[in-house]
Image (cartoon, grey):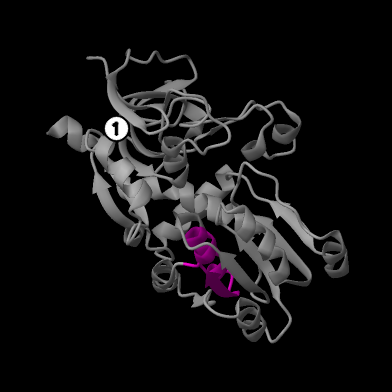
Amino acid sequence: MIDPNALVCLEPGRLQIERRALPVRGDGDALVRPLRIGICGTDYHIYEGTHPFLKYPRVMGHELAVEVVEAPPHLDLNVGDTCVVNPYLSCGYCIACRAGKPNCCVNISVLGVHRDGGMADLLVLPAKNLIRGDGLTADQCAIVEFLSIGAHAVRRGGVSAADRVLVVGAGPIGIGVALFAGLTGARVGILDRERERAETARRLTGTEIIPAEGNLAAAVQSFTNGEGFEVVFDATGNSKAMEAGFDHVAHGGRYVLVSVVKEAITFRDPDLHRKEMSLFGSRNATVADFKQVMAAIRERKIDADALITHRTTLADAVVDIPRWATQKVGLIKAMIEADTDRLG
């Protein structure tokens, strides 16, 4: 077996294809071949140098559909299986893991962030982090991870059919939140300062648009009969938008911060207490969220394929990622077809 190629971000603004040593599989590991790699906002942040938890150089990529090449014999994995990857590698013994929250493990290692990820020909992963994608295509498997972040956020917010929900930010994560909030029966509005993105999100999720132009406070009040939203989600990655979101929460409501920024955000303590608002962070996703998303795709409650708007190969991603980092019109999810490089 020849040494694999990998797409490496050497430093902010610099990508390069490199030949890497063949990865060595441990007893509990599986050797896998990436088939599809979704390009995430995290990957663009790494390329741009704005990710808060990263050291360079780094092989990016954590939204993965993989084919099993080698697997431990005692597990329910077979050579040739197509799998979804849970990219959140947890320790299993810290306070969060003991509480059933491996998504915020104290010692977490996220593929493509804390350790090298899936933009490579071959990859070794803990076999326990593979979920067989029975009934799903490679494209659908690669979509599962980012949708799981949205599903987890909705679960954190305790959304029900009785709620009015605001999703701020109409990127892929915001779309995932809106989709799963909508599946609860809640009435969902989406807010984005770019009208084209808001319209795309409305078309894909069936949500309503809260117009960002003009008097935003009046638009929120009109949507909610002057009461505010029972649940507000921020998926912007913008500190000013995160701070503004507190104003949209109803008395007794919940505010869920899905995005993460480097800088501090502030809020007015009297407003938080006056509303008895609940403030939640939502980080990553759990296996339960992955399985919920996979079931929704199988049952055709979610059209995962409609979310893929751009495609490239591992070799061409060297030029496409920098271009898509700035040219986002019409872009929802770009997908690297990793097997195309090998077949070409």
Question: Which residue lies under the disc numbered 1?
Answer: 80
Q: Position of residue 22 (x, y in %)?
A: 32, 14
Q: Tell me if residue 171 is in the magenta stretch.
A: no
Q: Residue furthest left?
A: 344
Q: Let me know if residue 157 appears in the view.
A: no
Callout 1: 10 Å neighbours few (<14), some, many (20+)?
Answer: few
Q: Quadrant of residue 122?
A: top left
Residue 240, x across and y down, in percent: 63, 57
Q: Quadrant of the N terminus?
A: top left
- Quadrant in which residue 155 is drawn: bottom right
From the viewer's perspective, is residue 163 above or below residue 65?
below
Q: Secondary structure at mark 1?
A: loop
Image position of 129 (left or right of 3): right
Report if residue 293 is visible in the image. yes
Q: Residue 168: x percent and y percent? A: 57, 64
Picture residue at 53% right of the left edge, 29% below the top: 54
Q: Which residues are magenta?
A: 174-193
Q: Is residue 180 magenta?
A: yes
Residue at the (22%, 37%) spot, across then down? 316
Point 67% across, 64% down: residue: 244
Residue at 72% from the left image edge and 54% from the top image edge = 280
Q: Is residue 15 left or right of residue 194?
A: left
Q: What type is the residue that disc 1 sits on?
A: Gly
Position above or below: 38 against 5: below
Q: Is residue 227 above or below residue 180?
A: below
Q: Foreground residue, 48 or 318?
A: 48
Depth check, front residue: 26 or 55: 55
